[in-house]
Amino acid sequence: MECDKTLLSIGFERSQLEHAVYKRGEGKTRLLVGVYVDDLVITGASEVEIAKFKKQMKDLFSMSDLGLLSYYLGIEMLQVPGGIFIGQEAYARKILEVSGMEDCNSTQAPMEAKLKLSKQSDSPLVDQTMYRSLVGSLRYLVNTRPDLAYAIGIVSRFMESPTTEHMNAVKHILRYVQGSIDQGCYYARRKKEADWMEGFSDSDMAGDVDDRKSTTGVAFFFDGNIFAEAKGSCTFIL
């Protein structure tokens, strides 16, 4: 609460969509600050404005400057002259270790082609707590691995009564993670002459065998860098 009042008092405004994000200034003087407990992530187009903000905060609080962001909430950042790479290799290794699959054989796809899973599966039930823990951990991995979004979205449907059939699908995802553990998202520096956005969408049209809902996926790119992706189910009325 004290941090919130302080940021507002020095000219920041809080995002209406994400209350942990604050903005100050416009154009080349714009600053964005992300707040998590007592940690701040600062970004902006002007190093002068960033330095000015750091001095303001140091005058008000006892703070440490940790330099360029390299690790935050389980997400690793590698900043290079051409852009920024974000990944979760350490976090992914921890998931594999907890699941006992750190030495498993890898696979080249996160899910078998044309695999259909159902809530009415006749396979034996598995431990719900373990299943939910693994799927929940994998869902957080999607932050830097949009290639996992569809497969993890599918296995998330069976949290209530997971069976060995559903668990096998989760293990297949883990084997894919094992073989692509160092992958992530690379954001290239924006080119001044470039300013374009494109989006892609697809749907399987009534592919859910339980309720006949369609699974739709979308991905949006700005200057070739992915900035939004989502997957969900919807019902089409014909």
Image (tube, rainbow, N blue to C red):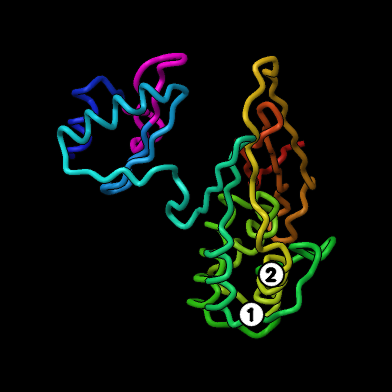
Crowding at dot 2, Cα within 10 Å, few <14 / some 14-19 / many 20+, comes out as many
Residue at (70, 20) in percent of width and height? 196
The answer to which of marks 1 and 2 sits earlier in the sequence is: 1
The quadrant in which residue 35 appears is top left
Q: Quadrant of residue 117?
A: bottom right
Q: Is residue 43 left or right of residue 142?
A: left
Q: Name, please, the residue furthest toward the right.
A: 113
- Give the percent coordinates (x, y) of residue 132: 51, 70
Provide the residue designation for mark 1. 101
Q: Amino acid at mark 2?
A: Gln
| Relative horizontal placement of residue 61, taking residue 195 as reference (left or right) | left
Q: Which residues lie in the magenta part?
A: 14-32
Image position of 142 with respect to 31: above or below = below
Q: Amino acid at mark 1?
A: Met
- Provide the residue designation for mark 2: 178
User: Helix or strand or loop: what does disc 2 sit on?
Assistant: helix
